[in-house]
Every structure is written in structure tokens, then in C-alpha cells.
Image (cartoon, rainbow, N blue to C red):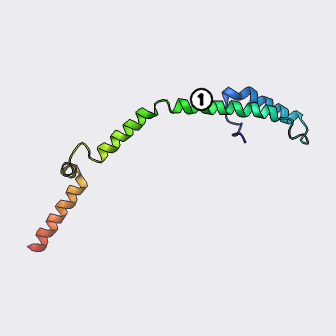
Amino acid sequence: MHPPLDRPHPDCQTEINALQTCHATTSKLKFWACNDVKFQLDKCLKEEKLRLLDQMNKDVEKRRQLEEDAYQKALGKDVSFEEYLKGDREYQRAVEEGRRARNEGGA
């Protein structure tokens, strides 16, 4: 199986055109008649996929390191747990509400 041929494959357009021509001009009863053209197309599409993957993953280590740094920072590896809680507004709000509730309940 090959991917849909209606989207652009600039590297393989010659092979795509050859396969479409073969399908249009060959009898449907000779289902093996276009195999050589299809094999060439499959090889071209595989090479295209490998090239695109290499292009997408060329700086994957750098991106992974940036993600790891952001994750470590989110975990608070740069600061202690107490310092992290002091900077957490939602936690501070909850602590303050708890203090007010205790003061109102005890008074």
C-alpha cells in the first residue's frame, strides 16, 4: 500500500504519473502488469519519508533537552519545595482561607 497520491509528492511525481498511466492503459485483468512501476513508486516514497523524517528530527536532541529542562524547572528542581509553595498563588490563597476559617470558627 502507498499513501494517497492526491497530496503533493514532489520527489516522486514522475513515478506517480507513470503508475497512473499504467493503470489507465493496462487491462484490469492483468493485475500484475504495473508491479514494476509500483515497486519504483514504493521505493521513491520510502526515500521521501526517510528524508522528511531526517529533516523533522535533525534537532531532536536539542528539543528534548529543552523539554527536559522545562520539566525539571516545573518540578521545582531549581528551588526548594517551600520556596515553590511561597510562589504558588493558589496555595497561598488556600492557606489564607484556612487561617481565616480557623480564626472565625475559634472566635
The number of discs equals 1
Residue placed at 23% from the left, 51% from the top? 88
Please, is residue 61 above or below residue 99 in the view? Answer: above
Residue placed at 73% from the left, 42% from the top? 1
**Residue 53: image x %, image y %?**
56, 33
Dividing the picture into quadrants, the one containing residue 33 is: top right
Question: To which residue does mark 1 refer?
Answer: 51
- Lateral position of residue 53 relative to residue 65, left or right: right
Residue placed at 41% from the left, 32% from the top? 62
Residue at the outermost bottom position:
106
**Residue 77: image x %, image y %?**
26, 44
- Lateral position of residue 46 relative to residue 40, left or right: left
Dividing the picture into quadrants, the one containing residue 13 is: top right
- Lateral position of residue 20 relative to residue 92, left or right: right
Disc 1 element: helix
Residue at the outermost left position:
107
**Along the line of sight, the residue nearer the viewer: 89 or 64:** 64
- At label 1, which amino acid type do we have? Arg
User: Which quarter of the rendered picture does the C terminus lie within?
Assistant: bottom left
Please, is residue 92 above or below residue 98 in the view? Answer: above
**Residue 19: image x %, image y %?**
79, 33
**Along the line of sight, the residue nearer the viewer: 46 or 9:** 46
- Lateral position of residue 85 relative to residue 63, left or right: left
**Residue 85: image x %, image y %?**
21, 52
Please, is residue 19 above or below residue 76 in the view? Answer: above
Residue placed at 17% from the left, 60% from the top? 96
Dot 1, how many residues are within 10 Å of its Cα: few (below 14), some (14-19), or many (20+)?
A: few
